[in-house]
């Protein structure tokens, strides 16, 4: 049996990956994996339990009880949807994401999301490490100003307090950490299509991706 198709969407923080990936998954009736949420959940536990030891965090990566229900995220049956979006958690997420053993333990978990009829996965290393055989790979970028504004709006809309200046600084720091780390750094896969969404609406980008996917698979889906 051939494995279910995967659309991998990678890119820096607040490039619109999440919203676009969800939209594409809906359009194709595919499953959706928000891989960043897994790193955010480990970060949440790390902050809550004051846990920094790499070995302990790797255990959390393997054992944590996670449920994704629509847009909601549950950790041990507790709704943590809003908690994982704070800037404090974002910052710690990019720190725990540097730990090789954490990434290794998350591999199997992420690959388990690949089920028929297909999967849209977003993150930093979906096309390079987790699903190197993805049918379509996108690397989504946007200018730092556009990304900071998008993230600001997203947080305010969710009722989470935010400050544009500190947000821009945090995004820049986090991107540098993601790009320069030794394992699974944020780089486009050689066979990915790089797409700058600064001047495009989320809808336009999602439509484009669906079209490319359909063209690539001969219009079968
Ligand atoms: O929403 P945003 O794009 O800001 O971040 P995210 O996708 O939720 O990811 C949070 C952090 O997790 C990132 O800064 C990365 O350090 C890490 N991450 C990763 O290393 N690999 C992934 N596949 C996804 C996220």
Image (cartoon, rainbow, N blue to C red):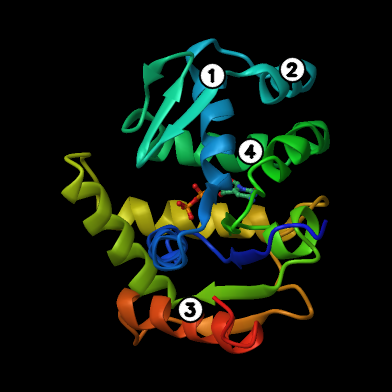
Q: CA distance from mark 1 to mark 2?
A: 11 Å
Mark 1 / mark 2, whichever is N-terminal: 1
Question: Relative to 74, does residue 160 appear above or below in the rendering?
Answer: below
Instruction: Mark 1 vs mark 4: give the one in front.
Output: 1
Crowdedness near tag 4: few (<14), some (14–19) or many (≥20) residues, C-alpha within 10 Å = some
Quarter where residue 107 is shown: top right
Instruction: Mark 3 vs mark 1: give the one in front.
Output: 3
Mark 1 / mark 4, whichever is N-terminal: 1
Q: Secondary structure at mark 3?
A: helix
Callout 1–callout 2 Cβ contact below 8 Å? no
Instruction: Mark 3 vs mark 4: give the one in front.
Output: 3
Crowdedness near tag 3: few (<14), some (14–19) or many (≥20) residues, C-alpha within 10 Å = some
Quarter where residue 65 is shown: top right
Q: Residue furthest top?
A: 49
Residue behind mark 1: 45
What number is the disc on residue 59? Answer: 2
Is residue 7 something that shows in the picture?
yes
Q: Is residue 184 left or right of residue 219?
A: right
What number is the disc on residue 215? Answer: none
Q: CA distance from mark 3 to mark 1?
A: 36 Å
Residue behind mark 3: 210
Question: Relative to 38, does residue 126 appear above or below in the rendering?
Answer: below
What number is the disc on residue 95? Answer: 4
């Amino acid at each position: 049996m051939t494995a279910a198709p995967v659309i991998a969407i990678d890119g820096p923080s607040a490039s619109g990956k999440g919203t676009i990936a969800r939209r594409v998954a809906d359009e194709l009736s595919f499953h959706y994996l928000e891989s960043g949420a897994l790193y955010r959940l480990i970060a949440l536990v790390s902050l809550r339990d004051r846990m920094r030891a790499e070995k302990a965090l790797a255990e959390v990566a393997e054992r944590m009880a996670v449920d994704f229900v629509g847009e909601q995220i549950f950790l041990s049956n507790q709704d943590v949807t809003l908690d994982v979006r704070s800037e404090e958690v974002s910052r710690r997420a990019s720190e725990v994401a540097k730990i090789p053993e954490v990434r290794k333990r998350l591999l199997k978990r992420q690959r388990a999301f690949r089920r028929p009829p297909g999967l849209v996965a977003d993150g930093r290393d979906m096309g390079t490490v987790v699903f190197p055989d993805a049918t379509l790979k996108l690397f989504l970028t946007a200018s730092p100003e556009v990304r900071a504004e998008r993230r600001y709006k997203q947080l305010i809309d969710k009722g989470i307090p935010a400050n544009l200046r500190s947000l821009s600084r945090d995004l820049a720091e986090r991107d540098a950490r993601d790009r320069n780390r030794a394992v699974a750094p944020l780089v486009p896969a050689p066979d990915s299509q790089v797409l700058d969404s600064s001047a495009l609406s989320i809808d336009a980008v999602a439509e484009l991706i669906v079209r490319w996917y359909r063209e690539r698979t001969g219009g079968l889906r």
